[in-house]
Amino acid sequence: MAAMMQPQIILLKEGTDTSQGKPQLVSNINACTAVSDIVRTTLGPRGMDKLIHDDKGNVTISNDGATIMKLLDIVHPAAKILVDIAKSQDSEVGDGTTTVVLLAGEFLREAKPFIEDGVHPQNLIRSYRMACSLAIEKIKELAISIEGKSLEEKKSLLAKCAATTLSSKLIGGEKEFFASMVVNAVVAIGSDDRLNMIGIKKVPGGSMRDSFLVDGVAFKKTFSYAGFEQQPKKFVKPKILLLNIELELKSEKENAEIRLSDPSQYQSIVDAEWNIIYDKLDKCVTSGAKVVLSRLAIGDLATQYFADRDIFCAGRVTEEDLQRVAAASGGTVQTSVNNVIDEVLGTCEIFEERQVGNERFNIFSGCPSGQTATIVLRGGADQFIEEAERSLHDAIMIVRRALKNSTVVAGGGAIDMEISRYLRQHARTIAGKSQLFINSYAKALEVIPRQLCDNAGFDATDVLNKLRQKHALPSGEGAPYGVDINTGGIADSFANFVWEPAVVKINAINAATEAACLVLSVDETVKNPKSESAQGEAAAGMMGGRGRGGAAFRGRGMRRR
């Protein structure tokens, strides 16, 4: 009786939505598998593309997992975790973004029946973490190092890695052409870690094959005044002066007030302004520079002045391009033209202005420090060039990673099948429920070769059976065998040069396992009503003012409650 008399405890605000227990966990798993199903068809060389257009009317065509995940406006809190792991994979290694989302979704799909049967999520998490560390050890054991090879050998190996990445992209048809371009660009920047040292410039028109690599810096001709066409457009070994100042007559920024007692004094003030600009221009000329670049405007007076003295100038050069010219030519950006010494001037072998499609490009090639490169991309539609740029970004990241962590593994689902076999074997040595969980983890890894087959239109069951048989050979000779996309059978991925850096796989398995464990560890979701009501009030406020003076007031000026 006493228990019935106890008052009800109200802990959370009225309208708070709480869901907990097993149904909550299953709902989160379903949301994550739904997200992985969206990007599932984009995996591999025969993957399909997604066309996404937003409320502003921008159209994006892509099959890059990270790009698709960013553009999907996912609101489910658990599914957002998959978006985060795709972004982290993209920023860490550049490629494998679809793989990581697919693996995380598959781990959760395999865990779902266990959860429904009443297995405690912590048991699953423990087994998954153990399987993850075993898988990563196995990858490191199977990885082949490319260290100690000559530069030419290394370049061809890196080109194979880049070609593997590009084969699943829109520009896969020209993968050899772009792979060598990417490798040359990455080798050119050397040990410099800054990605922005490789510039990618897009020029619509022409075919993909018209794209070219500049061993130096190239940027679009900036806005120019009269007199520009009289300037020389080609120099051999010029000195380059980089500025961050305006070379034009400007009105005073501050509201300066000058009181004159005599009208003739006005002329002296005007003369002073002209003298200041002429003094700046003289100093630029006496420095010996033949190319003057500035981040700020170079006016019509300065343009004509330089043209008369056979000097090329360009104003309003973007910060990024200016920094790349500085890094390549060995110059330093100056914020004043006083005391310009030879040490701060850059140089290059050849400077020229060249027509590319409808655009004119300023090209600096043969730079002494050579720590920069520019890829000029050509193509038909704008969306196509945008996607080509994203594809090249992935390839550049992959080549950089392969250079640093110089170990590669077999692609085409070979490494996934080998780890799957290894984990299944290992699971047999474990007593208890863990055996089942590690088995399910091993089964989830097979999603990569299965999806590669499905996307290419092959019979996945048939190919997977062949792969299992090959990988089960006791001699271990079947380890590098993966899906052969061209014939629909199986082939030695190493012999076919389908390689990927080990770091991509390690990162993908790590991130996918962490994400799966994170979703499994959530047992309750609490949704606060406050934010929703605030949105509702804002919407009501916007609706006010329509019709009879708005619906916000009622009767004798009373708010409706």
Image (tube, grey):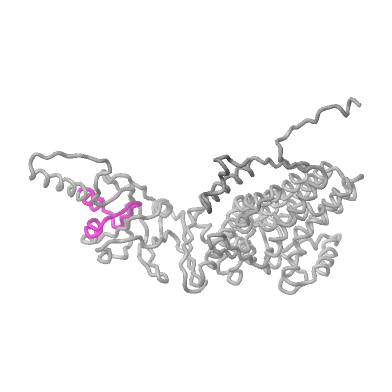
| Residue 415 rendering spot, x and y as whole percentages | 75, 58
Q: Between residue 128 and residue 234, name the one nearer to us.
A: 128
**Left or right of 397 in this view: 246:** left
Lateral position of residue 473 relative to residue 50, left or right: right
Quadrant of the image occupied by residue 169: bottom right
The furthest residue to the front: 556
Q: Judge whether 265 appears above or below 373 on screen.
A: above
For this rendering, which residue is in front, 298 or 293?
298
Quarter of the image with the C terminus is top right
Image coordinates of residue 446 in percent, x first then y, are 79, 59
Q: Position of residue 242 (x, y in %)?
A: 34, 51
Name of the residue lying farthest toward the top: 2
Q: Residue at x 63, y 63 (%)?
A: 63
- Specify the segment rendered in magenta: 279-306
Total count of labels? 0
Which residue appears at 16% of the width and 45% of the height? 272
As drawn, is 416 to the left or to the right of 498?
Answer: right
Specify whether residue 423 is in view.
no
Task: Indicate whether 73 appears above or below 167.
Answer: above
Please say whether residue 300 is one of the residues in the magenta stretch.
Answer: yes
Task: Name the residue rendered at 70%, 42% in the picture.
Answer: 527
Quadrant of residue 14 in the image?
A: top right
Residue 530 at least partly seen = yes
Verify whether residue 448 appears in magenta: no
Q: Of residues 280 and 192, which is closer to you in this image?
A: 280
Image quarter where the N terminus lies is top right
